[in-house]
Each structure stands twice: as C-alpha cells, then as structure tokens.
C-alpha cells in the first residue's frame, strides 16, 4: 500500500501527441494503455458491471431467478425494518451486529497478535525458520479442511473441555460454540488462528525494514524496550498497519465459509455474518432481491470504510 | 506448459462438440448423494443405464443438504448448460419449471402410467402446467421415532401412543440416566421435529391448514401455541451439547445407546443399516406419537431439464429407469425411504419399510399425506426457511415464549410470502 | 535490490534480566506455536487412527495403533460421488487449472504494475483505485452474472467451433475457471506489483530507453528479472487462494471430469449420511492441502523477504 | 549555428508549468552545465533533451536536426544517471553492451566495443561482476562506460557525482574533465553543486522555477550575475549581499552601510553603474564577494576603486589556505577573505578593504542587477 512517489514521472503523458509521429510510433506510445486495457476492461465489466447488475436486481422482485421489471425499493424496506428488530433478533440484525463484533475483534486481535508475535520473533530467535511456517501455515489451508478440526476442538463433548475433564480439571467449562450469545466469538478465534500468522509475516517484514540505526539511537537516548517499541517502532510501522487492515478487512467481509464450516450458522442462526445472509437469501431462500439489497448494503459499507483510505493513500501529491 | 494446457483443453472441448452430430449416449446428473449408502443406492441407477448403453457423467456437489448443489445448478442454468437431470426438492422444481428451463416428459409418463402410480401429492411437484417435468425417486416420511431397543427394554418402555405417553417415556429414560432425546441443534432438524409435533398436537386438518395452506388463523391459533409449548417440553430432554450437531451424530447416539430416541425422517434408517442393526431386534421404528395414520413426506426428485434434442433420448431413458419398479425397490431398500409409486411390491423391504409403504398408501388414499414444511414440501423455500428461523430461535432461546413464537411465525411467513 | 539481507537485531533489554527475558520470549513463542499447530495435530493423529479409536478415544490422544490405511483409502479408494477411485485424480484437475490461472494473473499483475508506475498517464490512480477496490467484491454476488457470461462465451465457442473447427477453449470448464480466477485475482496481483515497482528505480527504465529497449523489452529484460521477491509473494498468495477456492469451483466446474480438488474434497468430507469416516476425511484433507502447505513451508522465508521488498511498504 | 539549440521550450503538467520557455544553445564540443536548486526544472530539461519526457511547446535541435519527436534511442545520445541506473540483473559487460544488443549489434562487435571502453576506463577486471559487487566509484565508471560505448553526439549527465564521497567526487570530476578534453564530445550536465558547474562548464545555465536566470560562461556568471539569485547561488562562500542606501555627495555616489550602535560607513564609488544614480537616497542591495573584501595589505594592487573602513570582527575561520573573517554590516553577517597569515583577532576592530570595482548592485524590488 504505497503512497505515490513525490514526483510522478510521466514518460508519455496522454494529452500530448506527437504530430509527425508515424502510426507505428503512435502505437508505441499507446502500448502501455493497450497492455493495461484488458485488465481494466475486465474489472469494469466483471466487477463494476456486476455491481450495477446487483443494484438493479435489488430494486426488482427477483425471486429464484433474476427478473428485470423494476418494482421499487421493497427489499430495502424489509432490510431497514429488520435492522431494528432486536427482540427476537432478525437474521439481518444478527448479521450486522455480528459483523460489528467479528470485524472489530478479528481485525484488532489479528493486528495485536500479529505485531506481538512479530516483535517476539524479531529478537534474534533461534529456530525462527521453523516457527515462521508454523505461524503462517493456517493461511494455506481452506476452511473446508480445518473447519472440522476446529469444530471438534471447540465442542465441549469432544474437544478441549472433555480433554481437560479427563485430565482432572472437571470444573472447566468452555461451550461457547453451543451458546447463541458466544458462538460468534468462536468464529473470531478460528478466524484469528487463520489470519494472524499472515499478519505476523507482514509486521515481521516491516520490522526488518526499519533502519537498525534508529533503534540504536533510541537505545542510546535511554529508551526502555517498551518505550522503544511504543514511541519509535510502532509509529514507523504505520504503513504496515494500513496494508494489514486492508487485507483483514477484505478477509472479514468474505468470511462466509468460516461461519458455515465451524457453526453451520450457529444456534438459531446466531453466528450469521452479512455474507451468510446474502448467500442464504440469494441462493437458498430464493429471495434474490433481498440478497442483492444486502449485497448492496455490504458494498456501501465497504465503500464507506475503504474509499477514504484509498483516496488518502492514492491521491496524487502536489509536486 | 501453459500453451500446451490451453491447447489441450481446447482440443478436449472440441472433441466433445464434434460428437454432437448424433445422439449423445450420456446423462449428466447433478446430485448431492455422496455418502456411502446414498451413492450405493444411486449406483444402481448408473448400472441400469449403462446396461442400456448410456454413460453416466457424475456431477456431485455435497454440502448443506443440497445447498451447494442448488447453487451450482443455478449457475449452470444461468450459463445455459443444463444438466440432463438434477436432484431437486419440491418447490425448486416448480420454480425452475416456471422459468421455462425444464423439459417435457409427458409422453413417457403416459406410456409408463405414472399418473396412476405416483401419489397425487407428489404430482403436485413433478407436474407443472400439465407437463411432467420431474421424476420422483422416493418418498421420505419425517414423522418417525427411532428408538434403541436395548435402552427401551432396560427402562421398560412401551410404544408411546400420545404425546403425553411420549413425555412419560422420556422421563423414564431420564430417570435411568440415559439422554432421553437425541437432537441435532441445526434449524432444519429442529423444524423437522416440529412438523411432527404440530401434526401430533393439532391433528391432520390443522397441520394442512397451518403448514400447507399457510392459513393465518391456524398459524396464530392456540393450537400452534400449544405446539410450541410441546416443542419446548421436548427440548428439555435434550443433552446440553446438542447445538450444531449433525443429524447422523444424533442417530449415532441412539445406535450406541447413549440416547433413547431420535425424531427424524426415515433416512435415519440408513444409519442403522450401515451400522448393521436390524429393525425389531436392535432398533424400533414408531410413528411420532399421535400421528399414526398420517404421513408428513418429502421426496427426492430428478428434475429433467430442457436439453438439446440429441440428448433427449438419454433423458427419457434416465426417467424411465428412475421410475421403473425394479429400481424403485432396489434404491429405496438401500436408502431407507419408500418408493415413489404405490404399486411396487414390498417384498425386499424390512419391517419399517413395509410399514412405511403401507402408511403411504393409506395416507394417499385417505387424504392425510402432507408435505413437510421443514423439508420444503409445505411452502416455497422463502417461507420454509422463515419457518425454520422461528423454530430454531425458539429452541435456542432468542424467542422466549410460545406467544412470541406464534407472533413471530405469522410475521415471518407473511414477510416471506 | 533482489537481495535483502536480514539486519542483525540489537539485543533489547538489560543484561541482568536477559536470561529470564529469553525464557519468557521462547516460552510465549512455543505456546503460540502450540495454538497454531493444534488443528493440524488433531487432523494428523485422526488420520492415523482406526475408526474404533476415533469413536471411543480422545481426539487429542496419539493413535494407539497407527495405521496408514486411511491415507491409502483417501488417495485411491474413497468415493467422490459415484466414482470410488480416491481423490488422486482430482489433483491433476486442480493443477491444470491453478497453474495457468496463477501464471496469467501474476503476469498480468506485473504488467499492470509496470504500466501504473513507470508509464503513468492521466488518471492512473483512478484506474488503480478502481482495480484495487475490486478486491472487496463478495464473490457470491458475481456468481450468477458470471455464469451467464461464461455460458454466452461457451455458445460463442460452439459457433467458432462450427465455423473454424476450433473453439479456442471457450466453454471448457477448466478454461472458464482459469478465466474467472484471473479476473478476480487481478486486483491483488496488480496491487502487489504496483507497490513493488513504485520503489523500483525509474532511472533504470530511462537508461533502458536511452539504450533503445522497447516497452516489452524493458519489462522482460529489466523489470521481470528484478521482481523475484514480489513474484514469490504473488504466486504464493494466488496459488493458495485459487487452490482453496470452493465457490467458483463448485459452480463452474461442470461434470466430475474437470472437478477441482476442493470440490472433490468437499464431496468426501461434507456428507452427513452413513458412517462418517473421519480418519479418511482427515487424510483426504491433508492430501488436498499438501501442495499449499508445501508452498508455504518451502517458500516461507522468501515470502517474508518478498513482503519486505515491497508489498507492505508505505 | 550551434550544435545543440533549445528554443522556447515549455513543459506543462496539466496547469502546472514546469519549464517556462527555455532558450539555450551549445557549440560542438562544449560543456553545458545546468545548475540550480532542487525543483528548478534542470533535470526535467535534461530529460526532455533525452526524450524521456515530452515537451509542450518549443523545439530541440541537435546538429541542425529537430529531435522533438524522436524516441530516446534514436536521438544519438548517451546518459549517465545520478544512481548510475545499472541493471542489477546483468553483469558489467552486459550493462555496457545492452544498448548495442537492443540495436542488434553482433556479439563479436559488442565484445570489441566493451574491451575498448573497459581499457579507457580501466574496468577490465570488473566486466563479469554484478553491479551489487562494485564500489561507488566503480559503478560510476561503469555508468560512464555504458555511455561512452555508444559514441553519441551528445552526452547527458544527471548529477553523476552526487552519490560519491567528497574525495572521490573531486577525482571523478577531474576524470570527466579529462574525458571531455580528450574525446571532444558535447556534454550537457546537470548538477546542484556550483563548484562542479564552475570547474567543468564552458557554458552555464543557472535555473530557478523553470526559468533560466542567466546563461553564460562561468566567468560571466561569477563576475556579472544578473540578479540576486544567481549572485547568491554561485560562489562559495556566497557573495555578501547587504542592504545599503546610495548616498550622494555632489557629483559622486557612495555606498552607505549601517552598523549597530555605530556611525554608518560611507564608501565612495569611483565608477558606479549608470543606473545607480536613479537610486540616490534609496535602498539597494550591495553585493561584494568575500575575495573583494580583504585586509588592506591583501587588497588587489591594480584595482582602481578600493575603499577602507573599520569593521568589528566577530568570528575568525582559519581554513588553511585562507582565513575568513565575519563582521556585521547592514544587519547581516558579512564574510571577508583574508590571507592565511593575516594577523587578526576576533572582537577587535580592524580596517577592511572593499574592492568596489568588483561590487555589484541590485534593485531590491526586482532583485535584478542595476547596470
């Protein structure tokens, strides 16, 4: 997530043509744009085109299949009504509150744990080469693979609780995965397990990129280890925080299979995230309009969070 | 490497197209029967077709009780690549038929006499606008109790005939230190059990009014409230770790004797069979107390798609084989369900199967054969899922009282209609 | 620039508490290693147990009588749908989809990054921003429209086939999946390369221009040979994502002949009828995950270096 | 006709004008240095000559041929970059030969050319190494080798010495000068270091904010700066620029310098520039280079206009070859350049000689030289 360089080096600005240039050299000038064009066109069609399509569908009465007659914002009215149904919670209410809890905890814990592990690993650790892949590997596995193992581990009758009971700690109690009020936190645990190693790698890379002389200077200035990290190192890692945030935000939004594989939706649907809601309504309940409307709300939320960030990062700085 | 791959795949597809000139001796079949017993059952059909010279192109997509397969089907239909046939449930068939993507098997149906042999309740889903669009494979019935005989003997229980009997039986088991009721806390399992509870509490007329006709008076009646209270009572007999459990694990609890009884559709019998348990000696199958004489059903259907002409012959062969008496018998013996036509001999079936077939026939004739709302045969998926939401929220405590449950049910169903 | 040396860290902390410090640090690291390894451990021990032991024993206990049987069964015998030949056949399906998809998306990402940093035009940030934002689209919402487009392409392929005798792979499920993964992978590959090339000295490009190298010659001779670190990162990232994708794979894979590994694995693992053979499931899961595990373990060190070299620069 | 001619060159990025009409020319075999503070447009100007950036208006001609629209590789130029821009993935030989390879020169011929250049620059033993294995000076040589091997019409240097340490910089500066002398090539050279500009150039263009402030020989630039900016930028230590008022006594003009707490000094001018009379009684900026301000014994013998005044010496800086004395005039620190052995103590009041022949005056409003 790099910022734009101070001086943007323009080799062939588009607003200037070379009057006497031959067709061939004009082709050469256009080459970069020609190379970029397919990717850009694909993005426009297959991302933004589809977003428009989704927005359109959300204003129709689409059920099992897309229907193209606009019938008004009924889907949004339903979502809006559900937004405030907290007793008993509507599926939509559950999904968005879960998104808040999950999104915040998942991103926060991943960042904190990733940074913490990276700092520990950066202390000239023998066996770093062995530990690093151990922390990283969860990212390599699909949750179809690891979901079962996690489900067992968190199941009070099979996993941790039972094991500790067998070992003699009979008062130990850990049944979050069965509890409607806590199941979302088990999703956080599994999610953190999956992504925090990757974030650790990003922070480790960031730490390795910090000039050793700055650290020396701070030590000479009498900074304690804690002060060194809090006042010098962590501020220097700001760009990594931002990149990690983007990666985590995108993973959080797409955490669909995590919920399904781990909890099958949780007791009474209490583990749903908006992506589950969207999938359920679009594909399972044949209420495509509502599914599309929820997708639009999701995209709007993402836009509200990501676009200001992208804008501040990508805006061309004055020369 | 890349070039080679691309050319290779291109060539492969080229060859596939080249064969289009004459009839394609191949059926493409989308389904989610991937586990041992089900796959074995389906293999019978594959064998039957291969005897006639048709190749079987398998498109299995497991997961979520067909959710993943239905998503794949939707994508295939959107792409215009219809499979020859797909496993489908209830209202989904009608939705696809309304979208005009299903084929027409009426000719074959007339020839084979399906109109007479297939129960009318099933024809509601396999016939659209006067045309046969799907071949029913089986009939499942959901209002069953599955009981471990050893445990039953130990606690000295007898077949419960009423809901109160049932509760008394469960109390006995509880007193004996056995988990009385094995339940998987997933919304479809809870709702499937609730189908039976409603039928038991309100009787056949009430069930039909509430869960097939979606009559608002019935939905918000005191009978429905009573049903929820009964459900709440049953849930008190469930072990604390039930939430999220897969249904087959619940069945395993009964098989192993950890639990006394499970309320589940007749596919549970497949689990007993796989564990080499015999009906009558190892386990018992009773109708859910107070529902004898009625059958709440669901059915697996093979929806037949509007395939190109050169694939129609294969499709007809598939449909004919599916509804042939020999396959209906062989398949359903393995699967635990009963045949989708009422004129199949019951000789190969076990005691539970025989009872199931007799019950189906009686219910069909007596007008007490009802679609299961939980299984998508009572109302379209939007309604069925809204219903499952409410039941599950009630079981897990998001909805606290039966009054509230009834209000929510009416609201949710109204919303989804 | 391709060689990133690891600077030696200064020891942090006083001399007196040093030993204690080290013990605490190693202790914490080991504890977290256990946390990360736990699911893998459960899967591994389960895959070597007999069904009896799984049903009656503790899931964390080591197998009493280790057996390789589940692995053999998963590899060569277990049923995927109606075909009972194990999951070995689906490996090739996945590979012939994943390899082209990873290579094409990475190469396009590299070209895009090259253009967006070294051949800027007015509005280049907008173009990049739009491509980056595309990373956030939930894939569930593109499933159907994409299927429609793939279907049209397939029919166009048939037309081409009839007209020219060659369909150019249009309509082929593997080609479709490659296409889809390339399209939805572009955002990330472009991001990775753009950030890397941002720090790539522009003077090298100028020098090569003065030397008479063309657009593509500069890319091939100057940019690519100096892109190893980010190449590794991108390939690992893309490989993992595409190998593990289930949604697109299940929706667009067509018949079992071209079904990728994840769909086959799902069909083995995600069945809820009959006796669930957890040991075989776990073995199958491990086999399916081997390529990605291998990639992470083997290329792990280059991964951190690659991240260092650009992906996380500010 | 000059060898390199730049006429009315303008460059805009959107609405921002980066080069505002540059007119410069250079004879064949000349050495043009573009000098100025960072951001003045000197590198952009060089890039437009190289063809690495397009121009919005104007014309660039080399040897009578307009090259505005030619691709960099077709302009018959070679360029040495600040970072040397050696391709890290190629050996030294590969780097030097890359341009020929791109032009399709046969391998044998390339080898011959490499050997020849390697001999000239004494880098024969480095040919098989990668750039990362070279020291800064070696990289610099390789970068020059890559330029030399092309035998171009025009050499472009973009701050080639700024990444070297002080000693090496001096060595390489001499080397470049020698190379220019022996090969007789035409060179355009960008630097922000005015010493490099003075020592190397046959022509200097001092730039600021996209405009050429002054274009001329080093001596012209040094002795006759056209404005305050050029006067201040060229020369080290910089020219003393002191606010003064012009006093008049009948026919002659004088410079009136303020001092704190003491009476102003009045220095009579023998040959004031014609324009100065208009400023009588008004403030102007008085410019005098340190070497024109000495102890009376060290003053230039044949200067026609020397005035002496007592100054309070605040600081003494013995630099070995010279001694610099800092005094305060007109509210500003003023540096005088004395002989190394000048007997002078800080805190004392000492007479200093102003060589007013070399003094220059600027209009404080326009900052231009008063002529």
Image: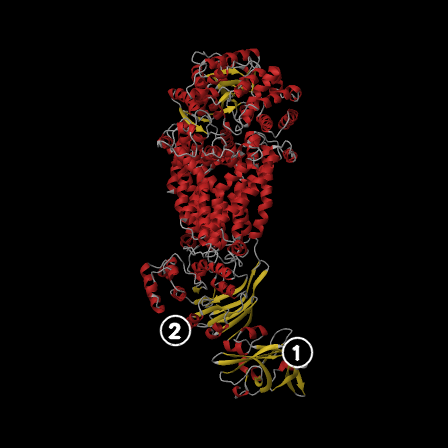
Marks 1 and 2, how far apart at CA: 50 Å
Q: Nearer the viewer, residue D338 or D14?
A: D338
Residue at mark 2: D182
Numbered circle sitting on residue B127: none
Q: Nearer the viewer, residue B298 or B57?
A: B298
In percent of width and height, residue B369 lies at 56, 15
Quadrant in the picture for the C terminus of chain A: bottom right
> Secondary structure beneath disc 1?
strand
| Rendered residue at 42%/13% (across/down) | B348
**Horizontal placement of B62 versus B53: left or right?**
right
Nearer to us: label 1 or label 2: 1
Classify A267 as above or below A213. above
* Up/down of D197 relative to A234, above or below: below
With respect to residue B126, does C203 lie above or below? Answer: below
Mark 1 near mark 2, Cβ–Cβ under 8 Å?
no
Question: Is residue C163 among the parts visible in the rendering?
Answer: no
Q: Which mark is residue D283?
A: 1
């Amino acid at each position: 997530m790099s910022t734009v360089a101070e001086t943007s080096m323009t080799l062939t600005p588009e607003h200037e043509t070379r009057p006497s240039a031959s067709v061939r050299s004009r082709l050469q000038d256009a080459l970069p744009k020609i190379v970029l064009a397919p990717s850009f066109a694909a993005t426009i069609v297959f991302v933004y085109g589809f977003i428009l399509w989704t927005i359109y569908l959300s204003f129709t009465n689409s059920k099992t299949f897309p229907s193209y007659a606009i019938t008004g914002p009924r889907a949004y009215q339903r979502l809006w009504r559900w937004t405030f149904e907290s007793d008993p919670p509507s599926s939509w209410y559950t999904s968005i509150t879960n998104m808040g809890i999950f999104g915040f905890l998942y991103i926060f814990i991943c960042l904190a744990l990733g940074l913490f592990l990276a700092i520990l690993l950066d202390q000239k650790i023998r066996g770093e080469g062995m530990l690093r892949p151990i922390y990283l590997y969860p990212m390599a596995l699909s949750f179809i693979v690891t979901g079962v193992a996690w489900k067992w581990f968190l199941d009070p009758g099979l996993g941790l609780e039972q094991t500790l009971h067998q070992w003699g700690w009979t008062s130990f109690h850990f049944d979050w995965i069965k509890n409607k009020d806590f199941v979302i936190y088990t999703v956080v645990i599994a999610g953190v397990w999956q992504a925090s190693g990757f974030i650790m790698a990003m922070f480790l890379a960031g730490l390795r990129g910090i000039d050793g002389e700055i650290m020396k200077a701070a030590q000479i200035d009498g900074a304690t280890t804690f002060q060194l990290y809090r006042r010098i190192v962590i501020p220097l890692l700001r760009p990594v925080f931002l990149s990690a945030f983007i990666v985590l935000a995108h993973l959080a939004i797409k955490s669909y299979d995590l919920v399904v594989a781990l909890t099958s939706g949780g007791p009474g649907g209490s583990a749903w995230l908006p992506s589950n809601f969207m999938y359920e309504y679009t594909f399972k309940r044949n209420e495509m309009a509502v599914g599309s409307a929820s997708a639009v709300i999701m995209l709007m939320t993402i836009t509200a969070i990501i676009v200001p960030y992208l804008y501040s990062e990508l805006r061309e700085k004055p020369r | 490497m890349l070039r080679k791959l691309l050319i290779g795949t291109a060539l492969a597809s080229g060859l596939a197209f080249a064969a289009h000139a004459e009839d394609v001796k191949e059926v493409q079949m989308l389904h989610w029967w991937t586990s041992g017993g089900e796959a074995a059952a389906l293999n019978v059909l594959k064998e039957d077709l291969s005897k006639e010279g048709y190749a079987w192109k398998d498109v299995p997509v497991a997961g979520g009780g067909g959710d993943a397969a239905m998503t794949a089907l939707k994508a295939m239909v959107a792409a215009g690549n219809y499979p020859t046939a797909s496993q489908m449930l209830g209202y989904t068939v009608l939705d696809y038929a309304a979208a005009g993507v299903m084929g027409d098997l009426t000719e074959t149906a007339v020839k084979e006499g399906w109109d007479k042999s297939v129960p009318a309740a099933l024809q509601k889903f396999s016939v659209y606008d006067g045309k046969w669009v799907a071949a029913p494979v089986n009939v499942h019935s959901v209002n069953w109790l599955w009981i471990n005989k050893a445990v039953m003997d130990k606690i000295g229980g007898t077949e419960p005939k009423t809901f109160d009997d049932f509760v008394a039986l469960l109390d006995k088991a509880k007193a004996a230190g056995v988990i009385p009721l094995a339940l998987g806390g997933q919304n479809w399992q809870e709702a499937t059990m609730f189908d039976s509870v409603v039928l038991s509490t309100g009787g056949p007329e009430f069930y039909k009014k509430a869960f097939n006709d979606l009559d608002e008076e019935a939905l918000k009646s005191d009978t429905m409230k009573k049903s929820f209270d009964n459900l709440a009572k049953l849930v008190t007999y469930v072990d604390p770790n039930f939430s999220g459990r897969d249904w087959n694990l619940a069945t395993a609890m009964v098989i192993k004797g950890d639990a006394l009884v499970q309320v589940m559709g007749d596919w549970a019998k497949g689990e007993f069979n796989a564990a080499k348990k015999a009906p009558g000696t190892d386990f018992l199958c009773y109708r859910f107390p107070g529902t004898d004489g009625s059958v709440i059903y669901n059915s697996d259907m093979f929806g037949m798609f509007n395939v190109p002409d050169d694939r129609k012959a294969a499709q007809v062969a598939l449909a004919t084989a599916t509804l042939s008496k020999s396959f209906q018998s062989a398949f359903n013996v393995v699967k635990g369900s009963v045949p989708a036509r009422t004129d199949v001999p019951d000789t190969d079936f076990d005691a539970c199967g025989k009872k199931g077939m007799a019950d189906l026939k009686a219910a069909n004739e007596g007008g007490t054969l009802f679609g299961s709302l939980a299984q998508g045969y009572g109302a379209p998926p939007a309604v069925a899922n809204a219903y499952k939401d409410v039941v599950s929220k009630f079981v897990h405590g998001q909805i606290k009282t039966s009054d509230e449950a009834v209000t929510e049910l009416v609201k949710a169903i109204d919303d989804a209609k | 620039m391709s060689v990133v040396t690891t600077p030696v860290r200064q020891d942090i902390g006083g001399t007196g508490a040093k030993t204690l410090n080290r013990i605490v640090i190693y202790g914490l690291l080991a504890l977290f290693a256990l946390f990360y390894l736990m699911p893998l451990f459960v899967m591994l021990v389960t895959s070597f147990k007999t069904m009896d032991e799984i049903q009656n024993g503790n899931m964390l206990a080591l197998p009493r009588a280790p057996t390789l049987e589940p692995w053999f069964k998963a590899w060569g015998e277990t049923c995927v749908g109606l075909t009972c030949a194990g999951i070995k056949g689906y490996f090739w399906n996945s590979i012939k989809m994943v390899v082209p998809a990873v290579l094409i998306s990475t190469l396009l990402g590299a070209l895009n990054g090259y253009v967006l940093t070294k051949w800027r035009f007015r509005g280049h940030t907008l173009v990049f921003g739009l491509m980056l934002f595309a990373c956030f689209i939930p894939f569930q919402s593109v499933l159907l429209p994409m299927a429609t487009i793939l279907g049209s392409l397939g029919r166009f392929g048939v037309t081409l086939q009839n007209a020219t005798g060659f369909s150019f792979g249009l309509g082929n499920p593997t080609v479709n999946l490659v296409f889809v993964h390339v399209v939805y992978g572009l955002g990330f590959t472009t991001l990775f390369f753009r950030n890397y090339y941002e720090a790539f000295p522009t003077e090298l490009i100028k020098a090569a221009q003065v030397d008479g190298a063309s657009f593509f010659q500069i890319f091939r001779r100057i940019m690519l040979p100096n892109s190893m670190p980010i190449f590794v990162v991108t390939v690992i990232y893309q490989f993992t994502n595409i190998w593990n994708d289930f949604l697109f794979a299940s929706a667009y894979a067509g018949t079992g002949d071209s079904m990728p590994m994840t769909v086959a694995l799902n069909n083995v693992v995600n069945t809820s009828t009959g006796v669930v053979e957890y040991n075989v499931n776990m073995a199958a899961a491990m086999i399916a995950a081997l390529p990605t595990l291998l990639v992470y373990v083997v290329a792990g060190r280059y991964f951190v270096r690659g991240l260092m070299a650009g992906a996380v620069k500010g | 006709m000059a060898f390199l001619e730049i006429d009315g060159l303008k460059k805009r990025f959107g609405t921002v004008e980066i080069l505002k009409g540059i007119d410069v020319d250079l004879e064949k075999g000349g050495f043009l240095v573009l000098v100025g503070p960072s951001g003045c447009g000197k590198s952009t100007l060089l890039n437009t000559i190289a063809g690495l950036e397009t121009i919005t208006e104007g014309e660039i001609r080399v040897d009578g041929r307009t090259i505005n629209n030619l691709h960099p590789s077709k302009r018959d130029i070679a360029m040495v970059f600040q970072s040397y821009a050696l391709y890290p993935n190629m050996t030294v030989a590969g780097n030097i030969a890359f341009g020929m390879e791109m032009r399709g020169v046969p391998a044998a011929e390339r080898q011959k050319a490499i050997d020849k250049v390697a001999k000239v620059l004494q880098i024969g033993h480095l040919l098989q190494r990668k750039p990362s294995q070279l020291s800064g000076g070696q990289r610099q040589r390789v970068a020059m080798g890559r330029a030399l091997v092309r035998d171009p019409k025009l050499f472009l240097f973009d701050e080639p010495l700024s990444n070297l340490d002080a000693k090496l910089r001096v060595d390489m500066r001499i080397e470049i000068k020698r190379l220019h002398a022996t090969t007789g090539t035409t060179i355009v050279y960008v630097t922000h270091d005015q010493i490099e500009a003075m020592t190397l150039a046959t022509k200097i263009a001092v730039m600021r904010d996209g405009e050429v402030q002054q274009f001329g020989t080093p001596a012209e630039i040094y002795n006759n700066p056209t404005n305050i900016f050029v006067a201040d930028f060229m020369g080290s230590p910089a020219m003393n620029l002191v606010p003064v008022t012009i006093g008049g006594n009948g026919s002659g003009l004088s410079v009136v310098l303020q001092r704190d707490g003491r009476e102003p000094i009045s220095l009579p001018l023998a040959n004031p520039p014609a324009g100065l009379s208009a400023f009588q009684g008004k403030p102007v900026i008085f410019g005098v280079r340190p070497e024109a301000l000495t102890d009376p014994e060290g003053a230039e013998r044949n200067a026609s206009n020397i005035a002496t005044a007592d100054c309070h010496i605040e600081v003494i800086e013995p630099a070995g070859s010279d001694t610099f004395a800092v005094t305060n005039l007109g509210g500003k620190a003023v540096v005088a350049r004395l002989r190394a052995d000048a007997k002078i103590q800080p805190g004392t009041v000492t007479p200093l000689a102003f060589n007013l022949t070399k003094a220059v005056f600027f209009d404080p409003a326009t900052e231009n030289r008063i002529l």
